[in-house]
Image: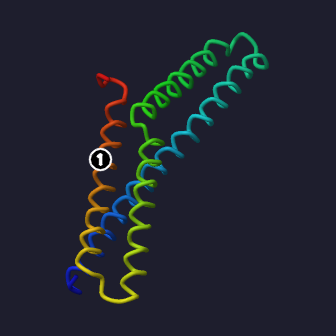
């Protein structure tokens, strides 16, 4: 395998790994933000409902409306998070990232031992194709299971 082909294949693997890492980080942040917001909304709704016991009947309609708003927003956020499937996407992208990282690590190790053979380069390229192909299939299954999609 020529040095140019080896460097090009390494660049391909590194580029795909970096892309998966960026996407995983984006979905992880969306998942964590959404879960934190759900916790805060649930706690606020409970506290607001309990506040009605302290303030008396004059403020009761206002507090009931506030509880209604908080629970409605919480329900809508929960539905949106389920529809986006951020946790599944994050886990999928991290798994693909680790597979690509393993391939990249092996390529660096074998490359440090000497110029890889053409057969080794072909095997690495085939492994890259398998990782990306399996990743595309799993991504399609995640999207297919999204609410509103026919299973």
Residue 139 screen position, x and y as percent: 33, 43
Q: Secondary structure at mark 1?
A: helix
Q: Residue at x 20, y 80 (%)?
A: 5
In-front residue for pair 1/57: 1
In-front residue for pair 137/66: 137
Q: Is residue 22 above or below residue 61?
A: below
In-front residue for pair 143/68: 143
Q: Is residue 3 above or below residue 124?
A: below
Q: Residue at x 29, y 22 (%)?
A: 150
Quarter of the view holding residue 46:
top right
Position of the C terminus, as image quadrant, is top left
Q: Residue at x 42, y 37 (%)?
A: 85
Q: Is residue 74 left or right of residue 120?
A: right
Position of the N terminus, as image quadrant, is bottom left
In-front residue for pair 104/93: 104
Residue 30 screen position, x and y as percent: 46, 46
Q: Is residue 111 left or right of residue 5?
A: right
The residue carrying pointer 1 sits among few (fewer than 14), some (14 to 19) or many (20 or more) residues within 10 Å by Cα, namely: few
Residue 27 screen position, x and y as percent: 43, 49
Which residue is labeled 1 in the image? 136
Quarter of the view holding residue 42:
top right
Residue 22 screen position, x and y as percent: 39, 60
């Amino acid at each position: 395998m020529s040095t140019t082909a080896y460097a090009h294949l390494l660049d391909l693997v590194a580029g795909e790994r970096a892309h998966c890492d960026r996407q995983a980080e984006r979905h992880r942040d969306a998942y964590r933000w959404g879960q934190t917001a759900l916790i805060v909304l649930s706690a606020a709704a409970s506290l607001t409902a309990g506040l009605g016991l302290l303030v008396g009947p004059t403020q009761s309609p206002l507090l009931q409306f506030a509880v209604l708003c908080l629970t409605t927003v919480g329900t809508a956020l929960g539905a949106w998070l389920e529809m986006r499937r951020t946790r599944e996407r994050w886990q999928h992208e991290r798994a693909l990232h680790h597979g690509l990282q393993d391939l990249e690590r092996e390529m660096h190790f074998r490359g440090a031992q000497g110029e890889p053979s053409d057969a080794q380069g072909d095997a690495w390229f085939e492994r890259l194709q398998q990782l990306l192909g399996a990743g595309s299939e799993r991504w399609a299954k995640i999207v297919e299971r999204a609410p509103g999609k026919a299973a």
